[in-house]
Amino acid sequence: MDNRKLISLPMMRPGQSGRVIQIRGGQGMINRLNSMGILPGKKITKVSSMLMRGPVTIQVDRVRVAIGFGMASKILVEEE
Amino acid sequence: MKVLLMGNPNVGKSVIFSRLTGVHVIASNYPGTTVGYTHGYMKLGEKPAEIIDVPGTYTLEPTCDAEEIASRMLADGEVVINVVNATNLERNLYLTLQLLEKHVPVIIALNVWDDTKHRGIHIDLEKLRLLLGVPVIPTVAVTGQGIKELAESIPHAISLDLPVRSRDERWAAVGDIIEQVQRITRRHHTWTERLEDASVSPLTGGAIALSILAAVFFVVRFIGEGLIAHVFDPLFQNVWAPTILKVSSFLGEGGLLHDVVVGKVVAGEIDFVESFGLLSTGVYIPFAMVLPYIIAFYLVLGILEDTGYLPRLAVLMDTFMHRLGLHGYAIIPTLLGFGCNVPAVLSTRILESKRERFIAATLVSVAVPCAALQAMIFGMVGAHGGQYVAIIYGTLFVSWIILGFILNHATKGFSPELLIEIPPYRLPSWQTVFKKLWMRVRGFLKEAIPIILGAVAVINVLYFFGIFDAIARFTAPVVSDLLGLPKEAITALVVGFLRKDMAMGMLAPLALSAKQLVVGSVVLSMFFPCVATFVVLLKELGVANMLKSAGIMIIAAFLAGGILNLIL
């Protein structure tokens, strides 16, 4: 478990899946993400990201969620 | 009895609400359609029950204004109908468990039930009922399936004494339930899913957005023009005009009463735009010039709303909107503003911070002309050539960007990050589209007709007594020297406070050049909001921010108008 590789959402490739490990943000941001089902342990798949630091769209459970670039960069995922 | 409809955003609460109460509310396929709350009544056995459509919420620990309203309303609900999206049980059940911890009687409407089959989702209903311990009724709100059973189950709502859990425990419990009741069969991507992903990818997304916006523009113009040319105009010229002329001769072809009721008759002809009587211009502007475009715009908007495309546009526009101090979702109030600024300002509640709401509401009021005003611009300025209409839209667009840029830097704080759920594409149901269209058209007629008729009457009387001449002399320096308009144009600006379509109509008798019309249209669009928008701005922003916003509008309007007057 020590040598696992963590990357942030914007760094993932479209179509790539992973498991959320950590959300590096304030309590407010963690609350908002959690309430939408994005929390450590959840499996997510990246759908796409917009150019020029645009939002990242992911699929979590059966929903697509768009997350602003700044917030997406703080979500760390273990690649699968 | 008070029954609350609660659930995640965009699960169909408003559609269920309409089905239960018969009260029609605007429902669309994007999160945050309902920002205030609506209530209606239904018969439950002998007694009426009050049904309340609560704005969607992901959690009872509120993270934004709409969610705060939702959790506050829970305090006085006697029964909760928890509307759950069956195609996304995992996320929806979190709120369900929170509700069950609150000791209120709950029943569950498992909505979008029909979609589970072709999405390969199998839900064991019996087991779900057993595990949750409350009634679960599968529903398809758009077709009405299961609504009767749902209504009959309201008295059987059950209150559980679940202990309050921590967030992690709750998610673990959700995972547990899902494991036992839901089975997913793999299947191939459908073409709508491919299209869904293509519309949030950079290259294809941009192309799709441009094609959709172009299509919207052409379809709205096509329907609007078509209705005017083939329905409303012939009706007015061939049927209505002879009738009014009879009234005119009956009233003696002159005098105050005649001028108020019929307006000026030149050489035995009614000029519907310029005559300016109650029966001529007062009826012609709302029905023959504005209504066709209202119908066209809201038909197209309704379809667009129900497909689920709008949140994707928000994703696409996010980076750009951040430069204006907003995030992508602010595109929704902006688009609604092209219909009417009132619902646009109300819908700024979907934005998280006060700062964003102030910027979004101000930008809409300044740079987004409502459908009524646009119809008049097309009708009056379009006659001089499309390039003049383009100058008006171009000026408004540039003002939108410049002002947004300034507000972003001048207002304290920062723009929060976008975080939205993207709904799947759905084929709009014609029934909902037309119901929505009818509600909006009726809203327009109820709002516009009394104000326009009242204004025509009052303005005629004021003219008769020369009041406007006095005002015009006083404001001539600004109107004539700065904007290059005849001093009488001040009446249009004054009337613009009531209704902007009416105000444009008042420019008609002044025989303006194309350039003057452009300046007039731009100033009218940007200058002070109409009274209906003014009232909601006041309510949503508070007095201090409203004054700030109004100041910005006035300065922006005169700057833009003055500059156009200089360079055109």
Image (spheres, coloured by chain):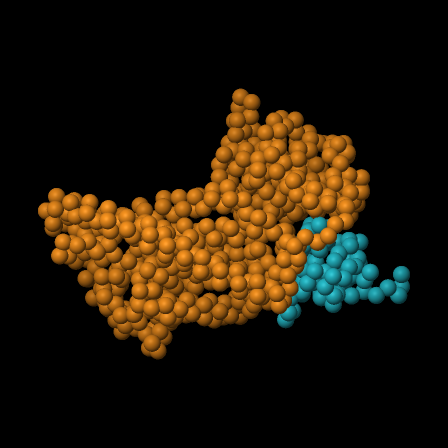
Res. B528 visible in picture: no
Res. B508 visible in picture: yes
In this rendering, the answer to whether B240 lies above or below B465 is: above
Q: Residue furthest top?
A: B46
Q: Is residue B529 left or right of residue B261?
A: right
In this rendering, the answer to whether B539 lies above or below A73 is: above
Q: Position of residue B56 (x, y in %)?
A: 60, 45
Chain B's colour? orange
Q: Which corner quadrant holds the C terminus of chain B?
A: bottom left
Q: Position of residue B246 (x, y in %)?
A: 15, 45
Q: Which corner quadrant holds the N terminus of chain B?
A: top right
Q: Is residue B437 left or right of residue B168?
A: left
Q: Quadrant of residue B19?
A: top right
Q: Residue at x 53, y 70 (%)?
A: B409
Of A55 and B204, which appears nearest the observer?
B204
Q: Residue at x 43, y 56 (%)?
A: B220
Chain A's colour? cyan
Q: Position of residue B218 (x, y in %)?
A: 44, 60
Q: Residue furthest left?
A: B252
Q: Quadrant of residue B150?
A: top right
Q: Is residue B219 left or right of residue B271?
A: right
Q: Residue at x 61, y 27 (%)?
A: B152
Q: Position of residue B149 (x, y in %)?
A: 62, 29
Q: Is residue B313 left or right of residue A58?
A: left
Q: Residue at x 53, y 67 (%)?
A: B324
In this rendering, the answer to whether B301 lies above or below B555 is: above
